[in-house]
């Protein structure tokens, strides 16, 4: 059986306590509030590449790494002289096919 819907393997959902960051390859294509389920259409991270991952340690130290974050790390975005560091990622998921079809191209 051939699947003709949107390509899902290039998409990941990075879930924090309150927010879902939907990423295509390494660019944020959607941000959704977990409580309401509403898309946040003016969120700072939209259409920005993920600049990297940050891991915070109990000692207060932090370590930055390039690429997409893993569970326990925070996602880092930067643009226009502003930075955004998310809260810790609690899970990394694959979006549902019907969700991927709602992303802006």
Image (spheres, helix red, strand yellow):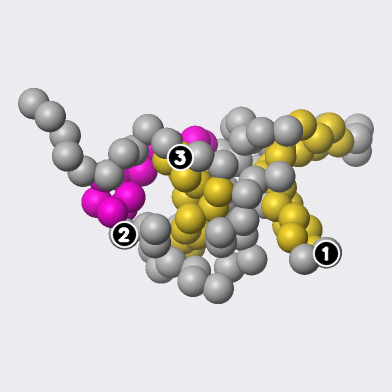
Q: Secondary structure at mark 1?
A: loop
CA–CA distance in space, label 3 to label 2: 14 Å
Q: Position of residue 101 (x, y in %)?
A: 28, 54
Give the foreground label among 1 and 3: 1
Depth check, front residue: 59 or 95: 95
> For residue 94: magenta?
yes
Q: Earlier in the sequence, mark 3 or mark 2?
A: 3
| Tag shown at residue 12 | 3
Residue at the spot of label 2: 102
Q: Callout 2: 10 Å neighbours few (<14), some, many (20+)?
A: few
Looking at the rendered image, the quarter that the C terminus falls into is: bottom left
Q: Earlier in the sequence, mark 1 or mark 3?
A: 3
Q: Callout 3: 10 Å neighbours few (<14), some, many (20+)?
A: many
Q: Please provide the residue range marked out in magenta.
A: 91-101
Q: Farthest residue in the left direction? A: 1
Q: Farthest residue in the bottom direction? A: 42
Residue at the spot of label 1: 81
Can residue 20 be seen in this snapshot?
no
> For residue 19: magenta?
no
Q: Earlier in the sequence, mark 2 or mark 1?
A: 1
């Amino acid at each position: 059986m051939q699947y003709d819907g949107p390509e899902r393997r290039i998409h990941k959902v990075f879930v924090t306590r309150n927010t879902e960051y939907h990423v295509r390859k390494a660019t944020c294509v959607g941000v959704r509030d977990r409580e309401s389920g509403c898309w946040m259409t003016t969120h700072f991270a939209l259409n920005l590449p993920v600049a990297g991952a940050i891991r915070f340690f109990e000692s207060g130290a932090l370590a930055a790494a390039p690429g997409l974050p893993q569970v326990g790390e925070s996602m880092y975005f930067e643009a226009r002289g502003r930075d955004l560091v998310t809260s810790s990622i609690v899970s990394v998921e694959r979006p549902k096919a019907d969700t991927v079809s709602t992303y802006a191209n």
